Image (spheres, helix red, strand yellow):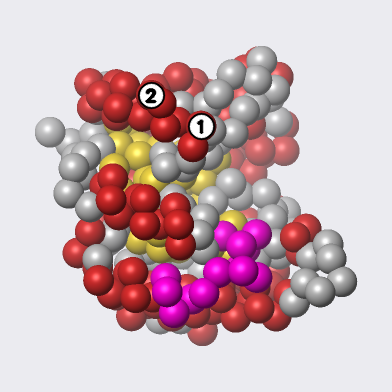
Amino acid sequence: MDPLFYDSHIHLVDEYYANFLTQILTSMRELRIKGCSVTIDVSTSRRAIDMFSEANRDVVFNFVGIHPEFAQTEEFSEFEDLVAQNRNFIDGIGEIGLDHSYDTSNDYNYSKQVDIFQKMLNLAEEIEKPVSIHSRGTLDEILNLIPSYDNLDACLHWFDGTEKQLQRSMDMGLYVSYGPLIAYSRNKKKLLSLADRNKILIETDGPVRYSGCFKNVTSLPTNMLITILNIMSHELKMTFEEAMCIVSTNSHMFFNG
């Protein structure tokens, strides 16, 4: 049975979820939710392979990647070997990207972050898998890099650019995802309204907590996706069912090609 709802970015292998992950997956299955599980380093990628290589494939898209925060310390060759050995159990590459906020020490080498990101994009292109991209404060740099790769399906996770950057992203055929912040962020609502409807995805980025109306409750697909879709339908002046259909179609296109 096809999913009704998709969470395009969630850290299901995060330690926070460890004690109740089985319950989360059971709830997702009952509510026909499928989540894109992303990783941040080699260790979490191995954990994802162990957890989602065969079991729970009906509710999980299994993405593995090296987050920019850990680009300085992770060995790409080790990650590359992991992907080569488990290619049939990997649905995409992520969370990957660039972020200057991690350049906080004198011995930090930002060029290493760029190198890892480019190698990740090359790998995704080679194995023909989509990518989930972290672009905080580096969107122009990333948009300048992506055209170097052919037939790369990419989602700018947690899109936080300007209207001009959004338009450029749409012109490049990229997907953009929005999360719970659209419940109380005027800027996010504005960006959502300007995005190509055929390129919109939704996410929780769990276990991130949100303020405002969510009162720092831990984010889960089962407690936030319907709220996100409801707000999305209101902002785009469509019914909830129409919004759900659009996101479902977009998600299927992104994850399945």
The answer to whether residue 140 of the structure is visible from this angle is yes
On screen, residue 8 above or below 147: above
- Callout 2: 10 Å neighbours few (<14), some, many (20+)? few
Three-letter amino acid code of the residue under disc 2: Phe
Q: Residue 118 has which mark? A: none
Which image quarter holds the N terminus?
top left
Residue 146 belongs to magenta span = no
Q: Is residue 170 left or right of residue 100?
A: left
Q: CA distance from mark 1 to mark 2?
A: 9 Å
User: Which element is circle 2 on?
Assistant: helix
Which image quarter holds the C terminus?
bottom left
On screen, residue 225 above or below 70: above
Residue at image location 22% in from the left, 52% down from the top: 53
Three-letter amino acid code of the residue under disc 1: Tyr
Q: Position of residue 72 (x, y in %)?
A: 65, 70
Residue 77 belongs to magenta span = yes
For the magenta stretch, what is the residue range? 67-79
Residue at image location 42% in from the left, 32% down from the top: 18
The residue carrying mark 1 is: 16
User: Which element is circle 1 on?
Assistant: helix
Q: Residue 20 has which mark? A: 2
On screen, residue 107 above or below 222: below
